[in-house]
Image: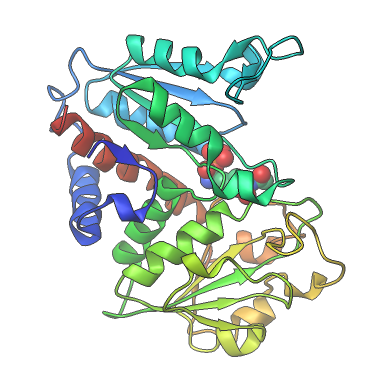
């Protein structure tokens, strides 16, 4: 594997999930694979889980890791070709990415969407330019429209904890005060649509996702109807796709509570984190027996390790 940017870069998702679960049982079995190989992690936005879990995964494989917090410690990047750089940007992505590729064997990049210009975000301008100019394999650490390491960890978690062969999985929108990307729900949807699950998306009117990511999903505006009989509930806020990047008024009653959990089949509750308590998810859910959010975050290590392992095997 030379690129991990979406589910479409994976030839066999079941094999990748099985690999992640195998690594969980035996984390240090491939310590020689990463010897004298270096992973570079480039962050243009904050991160706790992706940063730490991907570093841990690389260390388990015997790799060295270098981290650049480009938003805080790097030079201000220029993205436009042909720009006359007499403003605030100091270095063009052409040189920055190419130079990083000189120092490391694999690069991970996190670049959130601006949520202002939909075409720019959905063209993945920043991520794709890193891929184009760095000259080494690239792993997405969450790009403008997808978060594949998160979705892989989510699928690993569902595989691990499911109690029937084809569980009912519900992605349900949650309230938030800030406009958040569509990356996590887009990605979760496209992975679930390819997995052996019964998949439903519930959101208020106006929060329709780009249909490229939701082919095969059942989509409803009725949260209670969606929750009925669910085995896994995936809670996440996202801003509107149309009007792009906007938070629409109302819908506070979409926060998951124990009362709503009662409609489900004793569902396990997932969230990618970070989560705002009592806005997106209630204390009673997060502190209750059905929340598996910390377990899910723990599985980020095995997802990242499975991906890095496949990349190391191909360089
Ligand atoms: C980000 C998002 O929703 O995409 C990162 C989640 C992993 N969340 C926030 O910005 C709060
Ligand atoms: N879930 C997730 O990617 O968390 P971070 O933003 O903290 O990395």
Q: Furthest-right residue in view?
A: 249
Please identify the residue farthest to the front as the structure is shown.
82
- The residue that appears at 59% across and 27% down in the rendered structure is 44
Q: Position of residue 242 (x, y in %)?
A: 72, 64
| Quarter of the view holding residue 65 | top left
The colouring scheme, among rainbow, by chain, secondary structure or one colour, is rainbow
- In-image side of 46 versus 6 (left or right): right
In x, y percent, where is residue 270? 52, 62
User: Is residue 83 among what the camera can see?
Assistant: yes
* Spot occupied by residue 305 in the image (x, y as percentages of width and height): 28, 38
Between 116 and 237, the one nearer to me in the picture: 116
Q: Nearer the viewer, residue 31 or 201?
A: 201
**Above/below status of 313 relative to 263:** above
**Quarter in which the C terminus is drawn:** top left
Please say if 125 is above or below 242.
above
Residue at (57, 15) in percent of width and height: 92
Q: Quadrant of the N terminus?
A: top left
Residue at point 21% right, 43% down? 23
Task: State the residue in front, 292 or 39.
Answer: 39
Q: How many marks?
A: 0
Q: Residue at x 79, y 57 (%)?
A: 246
Res 48 quadrant in image? top right
Answer left or right for 246 relative to 89.
right
For ligand 2, the image quadrant comes to top right
Residue 154: percent from left, percent from top: 41, 57
Q: Could one spot residue 74 in this view of the protein?
A: no
Relative height, residue 175 to residue 263 (above, below) = above
């Amino acid at each position: 594997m030379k690129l991990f940017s979406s589910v479409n870069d994976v030839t066999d998702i079941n094999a990748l999930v099985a690999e992640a679960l195998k690594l969980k049982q035996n984390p240090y079995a491939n310590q020689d694979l990463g010897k004298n190989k270096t992973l570079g992690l480039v962050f243009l936005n904050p991160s706790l889980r992706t940063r730490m879990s991907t570093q841990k995964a690389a260390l388990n494989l015997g790799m060295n890791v270098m981290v650049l917090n480009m938003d805080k410690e790097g030079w201000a990047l220029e993205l436009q070709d042909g720009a006359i750089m007499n403003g605030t940007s100091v270095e063009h992505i052409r040189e920055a990415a190419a130079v990083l590729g000189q120092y490391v064997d694999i690069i991970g990049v996190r670049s959130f969407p601006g949520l202002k210009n939909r075409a720019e975000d959905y063209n993945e301008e920043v991520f794709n330019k890193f891929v184009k100019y760095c000259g080494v394999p690239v792993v997405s650490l969450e790009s403008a429209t997808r978060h594949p390491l998160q979705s892989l960890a989510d699928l690993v978690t569902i595989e691990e904890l499911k109690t029937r062969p084809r569980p009912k999985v519900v992605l349900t929108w949650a309230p938030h005060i800030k406009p958040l990307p569509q990356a996590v729900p887009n990605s979760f949807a496209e992975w679930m649509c390819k997995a052996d699950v019964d998949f439903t998306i519930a959101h208020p009117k106006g929060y329709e996702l780009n249909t490229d990511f939701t082919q095969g999903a059942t989509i409803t505006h009725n949260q209670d109807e969606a929750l009925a009989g669910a085995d896994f509930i995936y809670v996440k806020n996202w801003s509107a796709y149309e009007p792009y990047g906007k938070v629409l008024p109302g819908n506070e009653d979409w926060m998951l509570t124990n009362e709503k959990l009662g409609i489900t089949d004793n569902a396990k509750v997932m969230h990618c984190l970070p989560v705002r308590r009592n806005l997106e998810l209630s204390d009673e859910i997060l502190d209750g027996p059905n929340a598996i959010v910390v377990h899910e975050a723990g599985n980020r290590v095995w997802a990242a390790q499975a991906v890095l392992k496949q990349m190391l095997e191909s360089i």
